[in-house]
Image (cartoon, rainbow, N blue to C red):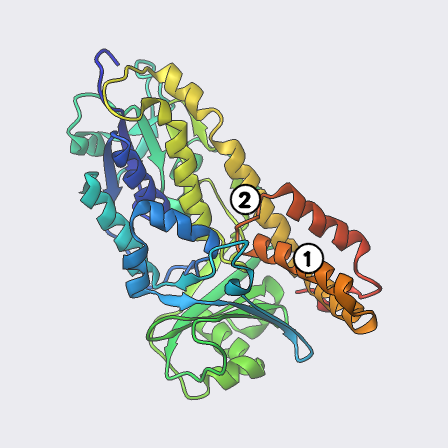
Amino acid sequence: MSESRALRVAVVGAGPAGAALAILLTQDGHDVVLFDDGRRPELVVGESLIPAGIPSLRRLGVEDAVAAVGMHKPGATFTWSPTHRFSFTFARYRAWMVPYAYNVPRPAFDEILSARASEVGARRVRLHAELVHGDDRSRAEITLAPEARAATGWPASPDVVVDATGRARAAARLLAIPAQVGPRNDVAHFAHYQGYTWDDAPGQVMVGRLGGGWSWRIPLRDRLSVGVVLNRAAAARLGATPEARLEAAIAESPVLTTTLHAATRVSGVATYSNYQLISTRGRGPGWAAVGDAFGFVDPMLSPGVMVALRSAELLAESLAPWRGRGTDADGESIAAALAGYTAPLADLLSAWMELVEYLYDGRMLALFRAGNDMMAERGGRFAQALQDHIEANVAGLASGTRITSRYSRGLLRFLGRHGLRGVSPAALAIE
């Protein structure tokens, strides 16, 4: 960079991670172009937010707008059998976390973030921007294809190209970057319904175990999102199409059948698969990946949007040395600043992977059962205080507030090894 100026940053993809990053970088004084291809699927997984994401919404200046389109989410309920049910509200642990979250229609939520990016001054370009290999002159590993490059209006290539293309993982595919794939090989099918029956708190998210998988019910303002996550054998047994599988899974579940017996499906059936993946590399000379383009984990605890927003914050902080206008920089110094960006993001994704596994292998529900057995046997103030402390730490993990806490994670590991009190996790595992 021969003159003092703001960094030129091209963000390719206008989902939550890309739009949030455009907001933050523009507010920091950078020159940002946000490429938005205009495609908004009818249904997008990630409709239920968690308390750890609320401070990010406030920082971005969008919480009021999100609240206007979303539904207040007081907590979550996990039902593994007629006798194994755990329900909690965030407000119970308000000393540990924001006491609420939201359930949101994702197209509207994503548009709120993109509109906010435009409002603060990012230039939103309606174009499917292609990423290509950089050249020797620019020393960038990735740059924009000529059409996208021309659309920026910049006299030179961007200083940083950000891959925010979600599960398309454009940069990783271009550079053939491998990924660490999680142990599950499931497929999810979901749709929206109206005219359903609801017997729990408004906005409470419901998760239940199915034969061969699990289900979700997420109340939105005018409809209910219902999804099933199935292992491949169970999915094949239930049918050959997404519609057939979803209908069959609902018919086999007394809980889902009761909820939807008078309901009408008002959307198509969306399908997601292969959703436990972390790239082995998420940055390089002249580029970085955010959100799902770097990695994504299982949706059981709804971490996706929170991780996307956090990745945007981490990348924005990596570019903090050039915050504001009038500071020289070059490719080498920017690359050095990006060098530490992905380590905390990879740690965050790994922490979520670990926590979700406690639900899949039955240890989480076994711990709650063991805790209830302890209280029934002993009771007393000390036992109650211990139980409350454990539950608060677990709720802190599940809400995302303490997901990277060494203490909370260590406590859960210790209990998973030594606190089951004879309760078998295998009986509570998800196939």
Residue 401, above or below 197: above
Task: Tell whether 296 sits left or right of 267.
Answer: right
**Is residue 425 in sight in this rendering?**
no
**Is residue 163 in sight in this rendering?**
yes
* Disc 2 residue crowd, few under 14, some 14–19, many 20+, Cα 10 Å: many
Alpha carbon distance from label 1 to label 2: 23 Å
* Residue 264 or residue 354, whichever sits in front: 354
**Residue under numbered circle 1:** 390
Q: Residue at x 32, y 62 (%)?
A: 67
Which dot marks residue 349?
A: 2
**Which image quarter: residue 225?**
bottom left
Please provide percent x and percent y for residue 367.
73, 62
Q: Residue at x 63, y 49 (%)?
A: 354
Which dot marks residue 171?
A: none
Kindly identify the amino acid type of the residue bearing the numbered disc 1.
Answer: Ile
Of pointers 1 and 2, the one earlier in the residue sequence: 2
Number of callouts in the render?
2
User: Which residue lies most toward the bottom here?
Assistant: 262
Kindly identify the amino acid type of the residue bearing the numbered disc 2.
Answer: Leu
Q: Secondary structure at mark 2?
A: helix
Residue 371, above or below 130: below
Task: Tell whether 46 sits left or right of 151.
Answer: right
Q: Secondary structure at mark 1?
A: helix
Q: Residue at x 77, y 69 (%)?
A: 375
Please provide percent x and percent y for residue 91.
50, 64
* Residue 101 or residue 134, whichever sits in front: 101
Please provide percent x and percent y for residue 167.
42, 47
**In the rendered image, which quarter contains the N terminus?**
top left
**Which image quarter: residue 351?**
top right
